[in-house]
Amino acid sequence: MKGLVYRGPRDVRVEDVPDAKIDWPTDVLVRITSTNICGSDLHMYEGRTDLEPGMVIGHENLGQVIEVGSAVKRIKKGDWVCMPFNVACGYCRNCERGYTGFCLSMNPDPKTAGAAYGYAGMGPYRGGQAELLTVPYGDFNCLRLHDDAEEKETDYAMLSDIWPTGWHATELAGVKPGETVVVFGCGPVGLMAAYSAILKGAAQVYSVDRHPDRLRLAKSIGAIPIDDSRDDAVEAVMELTHGLGADRGCECVGWQAHDPQGHEHPNMTLNKLFNSVRATGGLGVVGVFTQDPKSPDPLLKEGEIALEYPVYFEKGLSMGSGQADVKRYNRYLRDLIHDDRAAPSFLVSHELPLEQAPDAYKHFDARDNGWTKVVLHPGAEAKRKPRARRAGFAAAGEESEAVATPS
Protein backbone atom coordinates (compact mmCIF):
# COMPACT_ATOMS: atom_id res chain seq x y z
CA MET A 1 0.00 0.00 0.00
CA LYS A 2 1.00 3.65 -0.29
CA GLY A 3 1.80 5.59 2.87
CA LEU A 4 3.35 8.92 3.82
CA VAL A 5 6.65 8.14 5.51
CA TYR A 6 8.71 10.44 7.73
CA ARG A 7 12.35 10.35 6.63
CA GLY A 8 13.74 13.30 8.56
CA PRO A 9 13.16 17.02 9.18
CA ARG A 10 11.01 18.47 6.39
CA ASP A 11 11.32 15.22 4.46
CA VAL A 12 8.15 13.16 4.04
CA ARG A 13 7.62 10.83 1.10
CA VAL A 14 4.82 8.74 -0.33
CA GLU A 15 6.27 5.23 -0.47
CA ASP A 16 5.23 1.60 -0.80
CA VAL A 17 4.95 0.20 2.73
CA PRO A 18 3.73 -3.18 4.04
CA ASP A 19 -0.05 -3.46 3.98
CA ALA A 20 -1.87 -2.82 7.23
CA LYS A 21 -3.65 -6.00 8.33
CA ILE A 22 -5.60 -7.70 11.07
CA ASP A 23 -3.04 -8.63 13.73
CA TRP A 24 -5.35 -9.43 16.64
CA PRO A 25 -8.95 -10.71 16.82
CA THR A 26 -10.05 -7.33 18.19
CA ASP A 27 -8.59 -5.36 15.24
CA VAL A 28 -10.52 -3.58 12.50
CA LEU A 29 -9.00 -2.83 9.09
CA VAL A 30 -10.10 0.46 7.50
CA ARG A 31 -9.65 1.70 3.94
CA ILE A 32 -8.75 5.34 4.54
CA THR A 33 -10.62 7.85 2.38
CA SER A 34 -9.89 11.07 4.31
CA THR A 35 -6.88 11.86 6.48
CA ASN A 36 -5.98 15.37 7.63
CA ILE A 37 -2.69 17.15 8.13
CA CYS A 38 -2.68 18.37 11.73
CA GLY A 39 -0.78 21.31 13.15
CA SER A 40 0.88 18.96 15.62
CA ASP A 41 2.19 16.90 12.68
CA LEU A 42 4.36 19.92 11.95
CA HIS A 43 6.32 19.45 15.18
CA MET A 44 7.51 16.13 13.75
CA TYR A 45 7.84 17.46 10.21
CA GLU A 46 10.16 20.23 11.45
CA GLY A 47 12.27 17.75 13.42
CA ARG A 48 11.31 19.17 16.81
CA THR A 49 10.37 15.73 18.20
CA ASP A 50 12.07 12.35 18.43
CA LEU A 51 10.06 10.56 15.73
CA GLU A 52 12.02 7.70 14.22
CA PRO A 53 12.50 7.85 10.42
CA GLY A 54 10.39 5.25 8.64
CA MET A 55 7.15 5.88 10.52
CA VAL A 56 3.92 6.30 8.56
CA ILE A 57 2.35 9.43 10.05
CA GLY A 58 -1.20 10.76 10.30
CA HIS A 59 -3.63 10.65 13.22
CA GLU A 60 -6.81 12.29 11.82
CA ASN A 61 -8.41 9.41 9.95
CA LEU A 62 -11.74 8.40 8.41
CA GLY A 63 -12.72 5.59 6.07
CA GLN A 64 -14.67 2.43 5.39
CA VAL A 65 -14.24 -0.90 7.18
CA ILE A 66 -13.03 -3.66 4.85
CA GLU A 67 -12.24 -6.41 7.38
CA VAL A 68 -12.87 -7.16 11.05
CA GLY A 69 -11.18 -9.53 13.48
CA SER A 70 -13.00 -12.59 14.79
CA ALA A 71 -13.64 -10.97 18.19
CA VAL A 72 -15.17 -7.75 16.80
CA LYS A 73 -18.91 -7.69 17.44
CA ARG A 74 -20.23 -4.15 16.90
CA ILE A 75 -18.36 -2.81 13.88
CA LYS A 76 -19.20 -4.47 10.57
CA LYS A 77 -17.58 -4.67 7.16
CA GLY A 78 -18.84 -1.74 5.08
CA ASP A 79 -19.33 0.64 8.03
CA TRP A 80 -18.09 4.20 7.60
CA VAL A 81 -16.04 5.10 10.67
CA CYS A 82 -13.95 7.93 12.08
CA MET A 83 -11.15 7.10 14.50
CA PRO A 84 -10.14 9.22 17.50
CA PHE A 85 -6.46 10.04 17.32
CA ASN A 86 -6.21 8.40 20.75
CA VAL A 87 -5.45 4.67 20.59
CA ALA A 88 -7.15 3.37 23.74
CA CYS A 89 -7.90 -0.02 25.28
CA GLY A 90 -11.25 0.81 26.88
CA TYR A 91 -10.61 -1.21 30.03
CA CYS A 92 -7.74 0.41 31.99
CA ARG A 93 -8.42 2.67 34.98
CA ASN A 94 -8.20 5.86 32.93
CA CYS A 95 -10.27 4.59 30.00
CA GLU A 96 -13.01 3.41 32.37
CA ARG A 97 -13.16 6.97 33.75
CA GLY A 98 -13.37 8.49 30.27
CA TYR A 99 -9.74 9.60 30.02
CA THR A 100 -9.00 7.76 26.79
CA GLY A 101 -6.29 10.28 25.90
CA PHE A 102 -4.33 8.92 28.86
CA CYS A 103 -4.81 5.19 28.34
CA LEU A 104 -2.47 3.23 30.61
CA SER A 105 -2.04 0.09 28.52
CA MET A 106 -1.51 0.99 24.86
CA ASN A 107 1.82 2.83 25.11
CA PRO A 108 4.76 0.49 25.74
CA ASP A 109 6.60 3.27 27.55
CA PRO A 110 5.48 2.86 31.18
CA LYS A 111 6.26 6.52 31.87
CA THR A 112 3.84 7.77 29.21
CA ALA A 113 0.05 7.67 29.45
CA GLY A 114 -1.70 7.80 26.10
CA ALA A 115 -1.13 6.46 22.61
CA ALA A 116 -1.84 7.74 19.10
CA TYR A 117 -1.47 6.81 15.45
CA GLY A 118 1.78 7.83 13.74
CA TYR A 119 2.99 10.19 16.43
CA ALA A 120 6.29 10.67 18.27
CA GLY A 121 6.40 9.08 21.71
CA MET A 122 2.84 7.76 21.45
CA GLY A 123 3.49 4.11 20.74
CA PRO A 124 4.28 1.95 17.68
CA TYR A 125 0.99 2.50 15.82
CA ARG A 126 1.36 3.44 12.17
CA GLY A 127 -0.56 6.47 11.02
CA GLY A 128 -3.43 6.80 8.59
CA GLN A 129 -1.90 9.01 5.91
CA ALA A 130 -1.96 5.80 3.95
CA GLU A 131 -4.37 3.60 2.03
CA LEU A 132 -5.11 1.28 4.97
CA LEU A 133 -5.12 1.55 8.76
CA THR A 134 -5.21 -1.11 11.46
CA VAL A 135 -7.43 0.00 14.35
CA PRO A 136 -6.72 -1.83 17.64
CA TYR A 137 -9.78 -2.64 19.77
CA GLY A 138 -11.93 -1.64 16.84
CA ASP A 139 -15.24 -1.97 18.65
CA PHE A 140 -14.06 0.69 21.09
CA ASN A 141 -11.95 2.94 18.87
CA CYS A 142 -14.19 3.24 15.79
CA LEU A 143 -16.98 5.81 15.77
CA ARG A 144 -19.63 4.57 13.36
CA LEU A 145 -21.00 7.34 11.15
CA HIS A 146 -24.51 8.00 9.88
CA ASP A 147 -25.72 7.10 6.40
CA ASP A 148 -24.72 10.58 5.18
CA ALA A 149 -21.04 9.76 5.76
CA GLU A 150 -20.01 10.16 2.13
CA GLU A 151 -22.07 13.33 1.64
CA LYS A 152 -20.59 14.98 4.75
CA GLU A 153 -17.26 13.18 4.76
CA THR A 154 -15.13 16.32 5.13
CA ASP A 155 -17.22 17.46 8.10
CA TYR A 156 -17.01 14.07 9.79
CA ALA A 157 -13.24 13.95 9.20
CA MET A 158 -12.94 16.83 11.68
CA LEU A 159 -14.13 14.47 14.45
CA SER A 160 -10.84 12.59 14.66
CA ASP A 161 -8.99 15.36 16.47
CA ILE A 162 -9.36 19.06 15.80
CA TRP A 163 -13.01 19.62 16.61
CA PRO A 164 -13.01 17.45 19.76
CA THR A 165 -9.74 19.14 20.77
CA GLY A 166 -11.21 22.60 20.24
CA TRP A 167 -14.31 21.55 22.16
CA HIS A 168 -12.06 20.14 24.88
CA ALA A 169 -10.40 23.54 25.27
CA THR A 170 -13.78 25.11 26.01
CA GLU A 171 -14.66 22.31 28.41
CA LEU A 172 -11.40 22.72 30.31
CA ALA A 173 -12.00 26.47 30.47
CA GLY A 174 -15.58 25.92 31.68
CA VAL A 175 -17.28 28.01 28.97
CA LYS A 176 -20.94 28.76 29.71
CA PRO A 177 -23.65 30.50 27.67
CA GLY A 178 -23.43 34.29 27.80
CA GLU A 179 -19.75 34.43 28.71
CA THR A 180 -16.87 36.10 26.89
CA VAL A 181 -14.05 33.90 25.62
CA VAL A 182 -10.58 34.73 24.29
CA VAL A 183 -8.85 32.14 22.08
CA PHE A 184 -5.14 32.46 21.34
CA GLY A 185 -4.44 30.94 17.95
CA CYS A 186 -6.52 30.73 14.77
CA GLY A 187 -5.00 27.56 13.46
CA PRO A 188 -7.41 24.66 12.98
CA VAL A 189 -7.73 23.88 16.69
CA GLY A 190 -8.07 27.54 17.65
CA LEU A 191 -10.80 28.01 15.05
CA MET A 192 -12.55 24.92 16.39
CA ALA A 193 -12.30 26.27 19.95
CA ALA A 194 -13.88 29.55 18.82
CA TYR A 195 -16.53 27.64 16.88
CA SER A 196 -17.26 25.46 19.93
CA ALA A 197 -17.59 28.47 22.22
CA ILE A 198 -20.05 30.05 19.80
CA LEU A 199 -22.05 26.83 19.56
CA LYS A 200 -22.18 26.80 23.37
CA GLY A 201 -23.72 30.27 23.38
CA ALA A 202 -20.77 32.49 24.27
CA ALA A 203 -21.75 36.17 24.13
CA GLN A 204 -18.48 37.19 22.47
CA VAL A 205 -15.44 35.25 21.29
CA TYR A 206 -12.12 37.02 20.62
CA SER A 207 -9.74 35.17 18.28
CA VAL A 208 -6.08 36.25 18.44
CA ASP A 209 -3.74 35.61 15.51
CA ARG A 210 -1.91 37.52 12.79
CA HIS A 211 -2.58 35.52 9.63
CA PRO A 212 -5.23 37.36 7.58
CA ASP A 213 -6.76 34.20 6.09
CA ARG A 214 -7.26 32.67 9.53
CA LEU A 215 -8.61 35.87 11.03
CA ARG A 216 -11.12 36.07 8.17
CA LEU A 217 -12.33 32.56 8.98
CA ALA A 218 -12.71 33.49 12.64
CA LYS A 219 -14.80 36.49 11.65
CA SER A 220 -16.91 34.35 9.31
CA ILE A 221 -18.16 32.22 12.21
CA GLY A 222 -18.97 35.22 14.41
CA ALA A 223 -15.76 35.66 16.40
CA ILE A 224 -14.10 39.06 16.86
CA PRO A 225 -10.64 38.89 15.24
CA ILE A 226 -7.65 40.49 16.98
CA ASP A 227 -4.51 40.93 14.87
CA ASP A 228 -1.65 40.87 17.37
CA SER A 229 0.77 42.17 14.75
CA ARG A 230 -1.15 45.47 14.88
CA ASP A 231 -2.57 45.61 18.40
CA ASP A 232 -1.48 44.36 21.80
CA ALA A 233 -3.78 41.36 22.32
CA VAL A 234 -4.14 41.81 26.08
CA GLU A 235 -4.96 45.52 25.76
CA ALA A 236 -7.47 44.75 23.00
CA VAL A 237 -9.28 42.16 25.12
CA MET A 238 -9.32 44.45 28.14
CA GLU A 239 -10.80 47.27 26.06
CA LEU A 240 -13.47 44.99 24.58
CA THR A 241 -14.43 43.76 28.06
CA HIS A 242 -14.45 47.22 29.70
CA GLY A 243 -11.32 46.52 31.68
CA LEU A 244 -12.51 43.26 33.25
CA GLY A 245 -10.93 40.66 31.00
CA ALA A 246 -12.61 37.71 29.29
CA ASP A 247 -14.53 35.21 31.41
CA ARG A 248 -12.69 32.26 29.87
CA GLY A 249 -9.58 31.70 27.78
CA CYS A 250 -8.23 28.97 25.49
CA GLU A 251 -4.60 28.41 24.54
CA CYS A 252 -4.40 26.74 21.11
CA VAL A 253 -0.83 27.52 20.03
CA GLY A 254 1.66 25.64 22.21
CA TRP A 255 5.38 25.84 22.77
CA GLN A 256 6.30 27.05 19.30
CA ALA A 257 4.49 30.37 19.76
CA HIS A 258 6.11 33.25 17.86
CA ASP A 259 5.93 36.98 18.26
CA PRO A 260 5.03 39.11 15.20
CA GLN A 261 8.73 39.48 14.41
CA GLY A 262 9.12 35.71 14.14
CA HIS A 263 10.96 35.07 17.41
CA GLU A 264 9.92 31.96 19.32
CA HIS A 265 8.67 32.36 22.91
CA PRO A 266 7.24 29.17 24.47
CA ASN A 267 5.68 31.10 27.36
CA MET A 268 4.14 33.89 25.30
CA THR A 269 0.55 32.76 24.81
CA LEU A 270 0.17 31.35 28.31
CA ASN A 271 1.31 34.59 29.91
CA LYS A 272 -0.94 36.63 27.63
CA LEU A 273 -3.80 34.33 28.57
CA PHE A 274 -3.15 34.93 32.29
CA ASN A 275 -3.30 38.66 31.68
CA SER A 276 -6.38 38.77 29.45
CA VAL A 277 -8.77 36.65 31.56
CA ARG A 278 -10.65 38.17 34.47
CA ALA A 279 -10.05 37.27 38.12
CA THR A 280 -11.42 33.77 38.96
CA GLY A 281 -11.72 32.97 35.24
CA GLY A 282 -11.06 29.58 33.67
CA LEU A 283 -8.36 28.54 31.19
CA GLY A 284 -8.23 25.60 28.78
CA VAL A 285 -4.77 24.74 27.42
CA VAL A 286 -4.67 22.30 24.48
CA GLY A 287 -1.63 23.67 22.62
CA VAL A 288 1.20 21.15 22.86
CA PHE A 289 3.93 21.84 25.43
CA THR A 290 6.91 19.51 25.70
CA GLN A 291 10.62 19.50 26.44
CA ASP A 292 12.44 20.56 23.29
CA PRO A 293 16.25 20.26 23.17
CA LYS A 294 16.16 22.26 19.91
CA SER A 295 14.28 25.22 21.38
CA PRO A 296 16.03 28.60 21.38
CA ASP A 297 14.73 29.01 24.93
CA PRO A 298 17.22 27.62 27.48
CA LEU A 299 14.50 26.74 29.96
CA LEU A 300 12.44 24.70 27.50
CA LYS A 301 15.54 22.74 26.57
CA GLU A 302 15.29 21.42 30.14
CA GLY A 303 11.51 21.02 30.01
CA GLU A 304 10.67 24.24 31.89
CA ILE A 305 8.74 27.41 31.02
CA ALA A 306 8.92 30.86 32.66
CA LEU A 307 5.34 31.69 33.63
CA GLU A 308 3.91 34.78 35.29
CA TYR A 309 2.62 32.62 38.10
CA PRO A 310 2.03 35.55 40.49
CA VAL A 311 -0.58 36.87 38.02
CA TYR A 312 -2.20 33.43 37.85
CA PHE A 313 -2.22 33.12 41.64
CA GLU A 314 -3.34 36.64 42.47
CA LYS A 315 -6.26 36.42 40.04
CA GLY A 316 -7.38 33.04 41.36
CA LEU A 317 -7.44 31.52 37.90
CA SER A 318 -8.22 27.87 37.20
CA MET A 319 -6.50 25.95 34.42
CA GLY A 320 -7.12 22.62 32.75
CA SER A 321 -4.70 21.14 30.22
CA GLY A 322 -3.81 18.12 28.18
CA GLN A 323 -4.76 16.35 25.00
CA ALA A 324 -8.41 15.68 24.29
CA ASP A 325 -10.18 12.49 25.28
CA VAL A 326 -11.86 12.40 21.88
CA LYS A 327 -14.39 9.71 22.77
CA ARG A 328 -15.89 12.00 25.41
CA TYR A 329 -17.20 14.25 22.65
CA ASN A 330 -17.10 12.71 19.18
CA ARG A 331 -20.48 10.95 19.33
CA TYR A 332 -22.29 14.16 20.27
CA LEU A 333 -20.39 16.29 17.78
CA ARG A 334 -21.11 13.73 15.06
CA ASP A 335 -24.81 14.18 15.64
CA LEU A 336 -24.56 17.97 15.40
CA ILE A 337 -23.14 17.43 11.91
CA HIS A 338 -25.78 14.87 11.00
CA ASP A 339 -28.61 17.16 12.12
CA ASP A 340 -27.17 20.14 10.21
CA ARG A 341 -26.39 22.07 13.37
CA ALA A 342 -22.69 22.25 12.62
CA ALA A 343 -20.40 22.08 9.59
CA PRO A 344 -16.80 22.16 10.84
CA SER A 345 -15.40 21.73 7.32
CA PHE A 346 -15.72 25.51 6.88
CA LEU A 347 -11.99 25.76 7.64
CA VAL A 348 -10.87 23.21 5.01
CA SER A 349 -8.92 24.96 2.26
CA HIS A 350 -7.54 22.02 0.29
CA GLU A 351 -8.57 18.46 -0.53
CA LEU A 352 -5.74 16.63 -2.29
CA PRO A 353 -4.68 13.12 -3.28
CA LEU A 354 -2.15 11.48 -0.98
CA GLU A 355 0.52 11.82 -3.68
CA GLN A 356 0.53 15.58 -3.15
CA ALA A 357 1.11 15.31 0.61
CA PRO A 358 4.83 16.31 0.59
CA ASP A 359 4.03 19.55 -1.21
CA ALA A 360 1.01 20.16 1.03
CA TYR A 361 3.19 19.80 4.13
CA LYS A 362 5.55 22.48 2.77
CA HIS A 363 2.72 24.95 2.23
CA PHE A 364 1.00 24.20 5.54
CA ASP A 365 4.26 24.40 7.49
CA ALA A 366 5.06 27.77 5.88
CA ARG A 367 1.59 29.06 6.87
CA ASP A 368 1.16 30.10 3.27
CA ASN A 369 -1.87 32.28 2.66
CA GLY A 370 -5.00 30.22 2.15
CA TRP A 371 -3.60 26.95 3.54
CA THR A 372 -5.82 26.66 6.62
CA LYS A 373 -6.62 22.93 6.69
CA VAL A 374 -5.64 20.11 4.34
CA VAL A 375 -7.55 16.87 3.84
CA LEU A 376 -5.74 14.09 1.96
CA HIS A 377 -7.60 11.38 0.05
CA PRO A 378 -5.53 8.19 -0.37
CA GLY A 379 -6.20 6.26 -3.53
CA ALA A 380 -8.34 9.00 -5.05
CA GLU A 381 -8.11 12.16 -7.02
CA ALA A 382 -8.63 15.43 -5.16
CA LYS A 383 -12.25 16.07 -4.40
CA ARG A 384 -13.99 19.30 -5.12
CA LYS A 385 -13.67 21.70 -2.21
CA PRO A 386 -16.84 21.62 -0.09
CA ARG A 387 -19.44 24.19 -0.95
CA ALA A 388 -19.25 27.20 1.38
CA ARG A 389 -21.83 26.96 4.13
CA ARG A 390 -23.04 29.48 6.64
CA ALA A 391 -20.59 28.41 9.30
CA GLY A 392 -22.63 25.27 9.87
CA PHE A 393 -25.44 26.81 11.88
CA ALA A 394 -29.01 25.87 11.04
CA ALA A 395 -31.22 28.85 10.27
CA ALA A 396 -33.69 29.89 12.93
CA GLY A 397 -36.80 27.75 12.74
CA GLU A 398 -35.20 25.32 10.29
CA GLU A 399 -36.32 21.78 10.93
CA SER A 400 -34.35 18.57 10.46
CA GLU A 401 -35.76 15.11 10.02
CA ALA A 402 -35.16 12.78 12.95
CA VAL A 403 -33.07 9.74 12.04
CA ALA A 404 -32.01 6.86 14.28
CA THR A 405 -28.50 7.30 15.66
CA PRO A 406 -25.99 4.49 15.02
CA SER A 407 -24.52 3.01 18.18
Image (cartoon, rainbow, N blue to C red):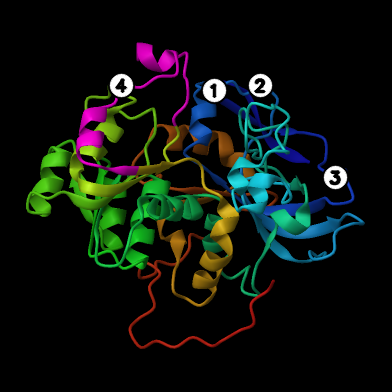
1 with respect to 368 (left or right): right
Q: Pointer 1 and pointer 4: residues touching (CB < 8 Å)?
A: no
CA gap between label 2 and label 1 equals: 9 Å
Amino acid residing under circle 2: Glu
Q: Earlier in the sequence, mark 3 or mark 4?
A: 3
CA gap between label 1 and label 4 equals: 21 Å
At numbered mark 4, what does the secondary structure look like: helix, strand or loop? Answer: loop
Give the crowd class for mark 1: few <14, some 14-19, many >=20 residues within 10 Å.
many
CA gap between label 3 and label 4 equals: 46 Å
Q: Which mark is residue 21?
A: 3
Amino acid residing under circle 4: Ala
- Residue 105 can be seen, yes or no: yes
Q: Which mark is residue 306?
A: 4
Amino acid residing under circle 3: Lys
Q: Name the residue beneath numbered marker 2.
A: 52
Q: Residue at x 29, y 34 (%)?
A: 269
Amino acid residing under circle 1: Thr
How far across and how far down the image is residue 353, in percent?
Answer: 61, 48
Depth check, mark 2 against mark 4: the one in front is: 4
Q: Residue at x 31, y 27 (%)?
A: 267
